[in-house]
Image: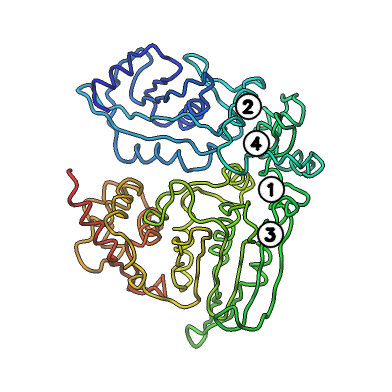
Amino acid sequence: MNTEELFALIKSDESYRIERTVSTNNMDKFQEAICAFANDLTGSRKKGYLLIGVTDDGQISGLTVNDALMTKISEIRSDGNILPLPIMTTEKVSTSCGDVLVVEVTPSFDTPVRYRGRTFVRIGPRRDIATAQEERILSERCAASLPTFDTYPCRNASLEDIDTEIIINEYLPKAIHSEVLEKDQRPILEQLASLHLWNLQWNCPTYAALIMFGKNPKYFMPGAYIQYVHFKGETNGGAILNERRFDGCLYRVLPQLDNFIRDGIVTQHPISISILKEKNVVNYPFKALHELMMNACMHRDYQSNMPTRLYQYDRHIEIMNPGGLYGQARPENFPFVNDYRNSVVAEIMRTLNYVNMFNHGISEVQNSLQENGNSLATFNTTLVTAFSVIIGDDAQTYENSVKSIDLDFTCTQLVNNCSIQVKNLIISFKNEEMSASELQLVPLLVPLLIGSSHIAFKKHFINPALGLKLIVQTHPENPRHPKQKYRLTELGKAFQKKLNSLPQ
């Protein structure tokens, strides 16, 4: 956007598309505005704009937009407070009077969109909480577009096929703000429809309702279960040591699965680290297995007759779920670009705290595996009808798997998607190996570190770069090694070269 386009937008009389503010800290206000623009109550399909650095009367306030503010606003998209996730971009426009941070929001097809359980809409120049009738309009508009399989009506199912007690007593209080819920006098079917769990046109539950809260989802979707098998050896031709099937709706299955992973798969044993001291080590970190299985349940193709597979071998685990990469996610941009085959299921799992953040799961998996001394997870994204991931119980170096990556394309994705902290960290590598303490003294990083502790530096700089495979530890077997240093991987070197080639 250039300055002429910005001034035209500021002077526009389409007040329902524009919100001006001079505040830089009112995150509730920002997120309510983004939620309202995403709902697009007027149905105009025109993008909405939050203009930070502009007064109510259209004057530019003289704001200076720095990287920290850009990062803070950009993270709204994936922090999980607005569900379903909004489609938005952020851009700084500099003028002679000061900077303006422009947040562009695309109207969502998957409505109603809620911010912390409340549905916000734009009523002319102001925003407000949607009425019951306005929510119904948004629900019906969404039902007409049917964006993903889990929003489709299951026409041979009825209200008796879903556990409404769980929905009313457990899910609704978490999905809808308590004040809104107390005032909602609509019939239960209309409430379910507003959450994409019921289709009013066909008077039946959606597949999302059956997947998450169905009494017998496998009756309608034969592959909707999880199959665990423990094989002796390294192939599925070995003797079967243990097997188990997890049937039922995800609301009941997911806690059972977590307990089984914790008690039945993860094992620990003590090792000596000195004459008088021992420490417990585990074969696989629970956090990594939990995240991978939650992703498998969230992203699988529920139209397939194939179950989600959790296969354990002597020295590795393989997780495979039906359905390859979906939508905008492709082998050449995974894991930097994410898309949702089951958007409603993803929203429910986030509300019930089975997944915490969107589009951050893979880096968290890799971090926890590396900290535990495991090999990094290897993802097979080339399969058309399935998606698999393998993790081993022995440490490996990253360079063995980087050869198959399209470095140039991946670097372009990193430029557009990773944080300013990670970018500046990669640029800061001048020596082949550098410690965290040495990196914290690099002039380029100092302005971003004011008031930050060593722990915060690792959390916001080092760990994300490790998760993205841009750097590796010189002592991966011991993350707390006193002489621990970091070096760029082949991908990290290519990304550094890409960043240095960009105009300043």
Q: Quadrant of the C terminus?
A: top left
The dot on residue 196 is 4
Q: Nearer the viewer, mark 1 or mark 3?
A: 3
- Quadrant assignment, res 406: bottom left
- Label 1: which residue? 212
Mark 1 or mark 3: which comes first in sequence?
Answer: 1
- Label 3: which residue? 225
The dot on residue 140 is 2
Mark 2 or mark 4: which comes first in sequence?
Answer: 2
The amino acid marked with disc number 1 is: Met
* Residue 201 rendering spot, x and y as whole percentages: 70, 29
* Residue 334 rendering spot, x and y as whole percentages: 41, 55
The amino acid marked with disc number 4 is: His
Q: Badge 2: few (under 14), some or many (20 or more) residues near its Cα, within 10 Å?
A: some
* Residue 112 rendering spot, x and y as whole percentages: 58, 30
Question: Residue at 62% of width from left, 39% of height from top?
Answer: 151
User: Taking 23 as reference, is 314 above or below it?
Assistant: below
User: Taking 299 as reference, is 63 above or below it?
Assistant: above
- CA gap, disc 2 to disc 4? 10 Å
Q: Nearer the viewer, mark 2 or mark 1?
A: 2
Q: Secondary structure at mark 1?
A: helix
- CA gap, disc 3 to disc 4? 22 Å
